[in-house]
Amino acid sequence: MEFIYEFNMGALEHLKSEWHVVRGAPVAVLIFIVTGFGLGLLFMRQEVANAQSEVRLKDTEIGQLKGERDDYRKQVEERFQKIEQQLSSAQQSKLMDLLKSSPSNVEIFSDPTVPLSGQITDVFTKSGWQVNTTETAKDSVVLRAIDPKSQAAIGTALRDAGVKFDLSAPASGGMSAVDFILFWEVGKTPDSPKTNG
């Protein structure tokens, strides 16, 4: 807008200085000059409007890019979370080796959407254990062992494979049953730990 103001003031000053020539010119020349001056003014205003429009368009594009960046960041965080919710191939192999030596029975309570759920079920099944699964809405995996032999085997295997867990006595399942509650998130700990693996 300052440019238009300067342009208009410069044109007016020029017109003042040449007024004696303009006054003697025919009317057609005066109309031509006034029309040219008006068209120039309209052109400059349109250029300013175009520039403002481009700025608004760029602001919109930047906003969209920020939204896309935030969506991408969220996708990456979700992928990392899923990776954290899995056993490594070394952990799976170690668990299978340790569990194969003393197959028994285990009941697995888990949310099927948690990647660890399918992995732990496969590990026990491939190790020759009798596996009963129950779906839960909780975002966790719980292994229930009824007899002392299976409890010892599961506890040793999880500990030696580096799988974090907590022990809990279930509300149902018999007096001697033990639940192994598995944790996979970095820094996540049980609400009220009794024994940490």
Image (cartoon, rainbow, N blue to C red):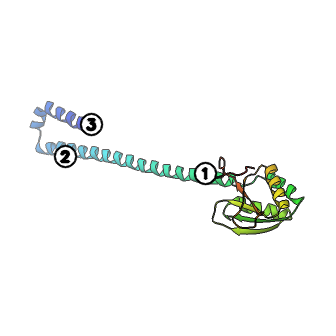
Place of residue 133 in the rendered image (x, y in percent of width and height, measured from the top left): 74, 68
The kind of residue tagged 3 is Glu
Q: Residue at x 79, y 53 (%)?
A: 158
Q: Say left or right for 186 vs 2.
A: right
The kind of residue tagged 2 is Thr
Which is in the foreground here, disc 1 or disc 2? 1
Q: Which residue is mark 3?
A: 2
In space, the residues marked 1 and 2 are separated at their CA atoms by 63 Å
Q: Which residue is mark 1?
A: 77
Element type at mark 2: helix
The kind of residue tagged 1 is Glu
Q: Is residue 121 above or below residue 32?
A: below
Q: Residues within 10 Å of mark 3 (few under 14, many from 20)?
A: few
Closer-to-camera residue (58/49) = 58
Q: Residue at x 70, y 60 (%)?
A: 141
Place of residue 42 in the rendered image (x, y in percent of width and height, measured from the top left): 25, 47
Q: Is residue 32 above or below residue 82?
A: above
Place of residue 24 in the rendered image (x, y in percent of width and height, measured from the top left): 9, 36
Place residue 154 in its image quadrant: bottom right
Q: Which residue is mark 2?
A: 35
Place of residue 123 in the rendered image (x, y in percent of width and height, measured from the top left): 80, 60
Closer-to-camera residue (27/134) = 134
N-terminal label among 2 and 3:
3
N-terminal label among 3 and 1:
3
Q: Residue furthest top?
A: 17
Element type at mark 3: helix
